[in-house]
Image: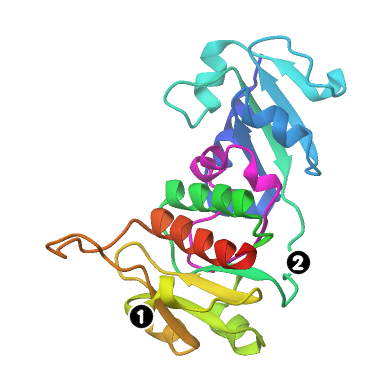
Amino acid sequence: MLSKNQIKFITNLKQKKHREVNKMFFAEGVKVVPELIQSSLKLVHIYTTEKNDFGVSENLVTIITEAELKKISSLTTPNRCLAIFEMPEEQLPADKGLILVLDDVRDPGNLGTIIRLCDWFGIESLVCSSNTVDVYNPKVVQATMGSITRVGIHYVDLSHYLQKTSLPVYGTFMDGSNIYQEKLPQNAIIIMGNEANGISFETEKRVTHKITIPRFGALQQTESLNVATATSIVLSEFKRILIS
């Protein structure tokens, strides 16, 4: 049985300030939790409605009721287990390879999908501006479907970070050069902007190459692409160039 203090502690982890103070976050579901357990993340505790073999010490597992799981879950329909993990230490990525940068991406679903895209396309480092949604937000963790363990995610002062890099900096803009006609490098920074406003003016000053995904529709009236959709196209094109 969960105590009131345990329930309060876990539900508090839904808030960024409590995650930062405790250096912990939680993940949910029978697909995501086992994958995170098998990663390098340090497990704190598992709460589950079924006695499953998670491959960890029994001291780290507590059997709870479905009603108790619903009290601590962030999901509308809780999925049998919730696990708490320690946040890993952050380290800045090496200044080489393809590095994806997010400038003020706010939607948890978009960030989670972008992390999965990084995993899919072999992007080892994702750099986020300080005002990008927190990667340990439960909705983001859920949307990554385990890819959070295979991508290095870093939060930085974006202006300072871009000022120090020696890599070419590619930014996505509506008036940029056609990405399909560009000779894209193997080592570069790729910036994707905010869902509503795109790349900020301050960040734009650090961009050395402006690119765009051209519209092919006859009427040319589509305003913009969803940032996760655009990211998939851009990463695919950078990777296609590498193997062509």
Residue at the extreme front = 244
* Magenta-drawn stretch contains 151: yes
Is residue 132 left or right of 92 when viewed as pictured?
Answer: left
Which secondary structure, mark 1?
strand
Q: What percent of the width, then of the height, locates residue 173?
A: 35, 76
* Location of residue 240 by image quarter: bottom right
Three-letter code for the amino acid on which mark 2 is drawn: Gln
- Which tag is nearer the camera, tag 1 or tag 2? 1
Whether 232 is drawn above or below 80: the answer is below
- What residue is rendered at 78% in x and 43% in y? 41
- What residue is rendered at 75% in x and 29% in y? 45
Magenta stretch, residue numbers: 126-154
Judging depth in this view, the residue of 108 and 204 nearest the camera is 204
Which secondary structure, mark 2?
loop
Three-letter code for the amino acid on which mark 1 is drawn: Gly
Q: What percent of the width, then of the height, locates residue 190?
A: 53, 72
Q: What percent of the width, then of the height, locates residue 40?
A: 81, 44
Q: Residues within 10 Å of mark 2 (few under 14, many from 20)?
A: few
Judging depth in this view, the residue of 91 and 6 nearest the camera is 91
Q: Residues within 10 Å of mark 1 (few under 14, many from 20)?
A: some
Q: Are marks 1 and 2 in contact (CB under 8 Å)?
A: no
Q: Which mark is residue 91?
A: 2
Q: Which residue is mark 1?
A: 176
Whether 65 is drawn above or below 146: the answer is above
Whether 222 is drawn above or below 28: the answer is below
* Quadrant including the N terminus: top right
